[in-house]
Image (tube, rainbow, N blue to C red):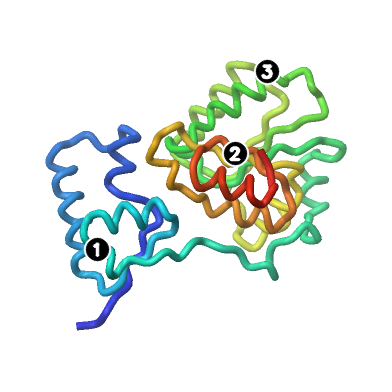
Amino acid sequence: HCKYVFNVSDLWPESAIKLGVLHNKLLIKMSVWLEEFSYKKADIITGQTRGIVENISSRGFKDKTYLITNGVDLNLFGKDKINREFIKNNGLENKFIVGYAGIHGIAQKLETIIEAANLLKDCKDIMFVFVGDGPEKPMLMNLKEKYGLNNVMFLPVQPKKNMPGIVASFDCALVPLKKLDLFKGALPSKMFETMASNVPIILSVEGEAKELVENAKSGI
């Protein structure tokens, strides 16, 4: 048979269970079985964070589990890639752009950003910009309307080739996650792209991500 490498970027189904997305006991049992089966059959397992590697290793797969973190292509991302047209076309000139680019999902708890925008709604020079899509986007847009916020902007999913210019256009970038012990072993890939773009990060997660930001002095 062909040898294969099983890459694990998130611990499933554990993440889905902790987030309250997966409730059905039969589906949970099947998912746990599939996860274990995948680990057993893989010739090599790679985990993208220390937490993931430690979790998998503790189940008896230490000898074939390795750490390979996410990274970034420095030829694509950099502050020199800033997209002036993106700023102009979206009326963001003379604005301090607080950006979030990524999935609008349950794990990110993005309503916290809307609440922050509501607290800062009288600061006319600050604009919160959401780029992307996801299951929570309608709720977030409704929350914006509920508060009557003019300092929040939602943009659709952008072509991948445009992202270096968009990220570089942010004055700071948000990397939020729900406060769960599970996420102490998370290392969102957007962090690397943001750091390569020389854009400061506002982080709301403990653990490995916080350690990276503090060591690199790349945000708070």
Quadrant the N terminus occupies: bottom left
Determine which of the numbered discs, if any, sits on residue 61 in the image: 1
Label 1 neighbour load within 10 Å: few <14, some 14-19, many 20+:
some
Residue visible at 49% across and 32% down in the picture: 109
Q: Which residue is denoted by mark 3 in the rendering?
A: 119
Between discs 3 and 2, the one toward the N terminus: 3
**Separation of marks 1 and 2 at Cα, in angstroms:** 32 Å
Between discs 1 and 2, the one toward the N terminus: 1
Mark 1 and mark 3 in contact (Cβ < 8 Å)?
no
Q: Give the residue furthest to the right.
A: 94
- Position of 40 with respect to 109 (left or right) is left
Mark 2 and mark 3 in contact (Cβ < 8 Å)?
no
Q: Is residue 105 above or below residue 213?
A: above
**Occupied quadrant, residue 45:** bottom left
- Mark 1: secondary structure: helix
**Separation of marks 3 and 1 at Cα, in angstroms:** 48 Å
Q: Which residue is denoted by mark 2 in the rendering?
A: 203
Quadrant the C terminus occupies: top right
**Separation of marks 3 and 2 at Cα, in angstroms:** 18 Å
**Occupied quadrant, residue 54:** bottom left
- Mark 2: secondary structure: strand
Residue 97: where, in percent of width, then height? Answer: 75, 38
Residue visible at 60% across and 64% down in the picture: 72
